[in-house]
Amino acid sequence: MHIIFATEIWGRSSHVDVMTDSFKDIASKITVIDPYDGTDPAFCSEEDAYARYVAECGHEKYAKRVSGALQQSAEPTCLVGFSAGAGAVWSAVCAENVGTATGAVCFYGSSIRNMIDYQPKVPVDLVFSENEPHFDVETVARSLQDIPLAQCYITPFEHGFMNPLSKHYHQEAYHFWLQWIKDQVVSHCAS
């Protein structure tokens, strides 16, 4: 099984490598896609990361990177995305040609609220934070829940809780949801 990870706006930081290494026992191949071509920009703040993401990449370009990696995969593939990466994954699995994709897991993908009319071609688990400053999570989740192949979950944690660089990182939640992701990936690839 191949797993494609799409990072947050922070890029490929050392924590991403630690997290993805924990999937080596279930994956034959792991690919990490990020907005900065594999470099760790080591941002000082989330605001700096967002400004660079918008200036250098943006959603459309990021979604194309994720779709391109998916099109190159030759084996059953599950995609996992966080924040901006979740939006890129959602776009990729809602495209006409999803290649070898078997499923996806998207965490706190705020941009998905602008793509609720998209239709995924494979099962997608959408995990949202309880509160988002720019939209009503319950309303978006209800809309997405009506889409075939989409399953929504709302956590009591804040946007970024899976990322040690975020001020909202939650260590206990990280460990719980990391195992949950592994279970979902295995389930998606077994289907």
Image (spheres, helix red, strand yellow):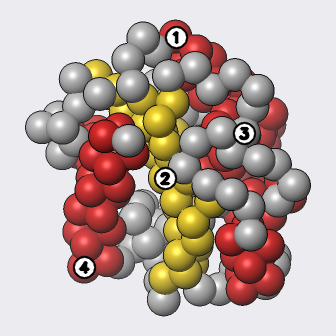
The answer to whether marks 3 and 2 mark residues whose Cβ atoms lie closer than 8 Å is: no
> How far apart are the two marked residues, 1 and 3, measured between alpha carbons?
17 Å
Q: Which percent across, then down, holds residue 52? A: 70, 41
Q: Quadrant of residue 129?
A: bottom right
Q: Give the mark, 4 or 2, whose residue is nearer the N terminus.
A: 2
Identify the residue position indicated by label 1 in the image.
72
Residue 8's spot in the image, x, y percent? 55, 49
Q: Residues within 10 Å of mark 4 (few under 14, many from 20)?
A: few
The disc at residue 105 is 2
Please state which of the two labelled residues, at mark 4 or mark 3, is closer to the viewer: 3
Q: First in sequence: mark 4 or mark 1? A: 1
Label 3 Cα neighbours within 10 Å, binned few <14 / some 14-19 / many ≥20:
some
Amino acid type, callout 1: Gln
Task: From the image, state whether disc 1 or disc 3 is nearer to you.
Answer: 3
Residue assigned mark 4: 172
Q: CA distance from mark 4 to mark 1?
A: 35 Å
Q: Nearer the viewer, mark 4 or mark 1?
A: 1
Cα distance in 3D space between marks 4 and 2: 19 Å
Percent x, y of residue 121: 66, 39
Is residue 101 in view?
Answer: yes
Dot 2 crowding, Cα within 10 Å, few <14, some 14–19, many 20+: many
The mark closer to the camera, 4 or 2, is 2
Look at 47% across and 36% down and name the residue there: 102
> Mark 2 to mark 1: distance in Å?
19 Å
Q: Secondary structure at mark 1?
A: helix
Q: Amino acid at mark 2?
A: Val
Question: Which residue position is annotated with label 3?
Answer: 94
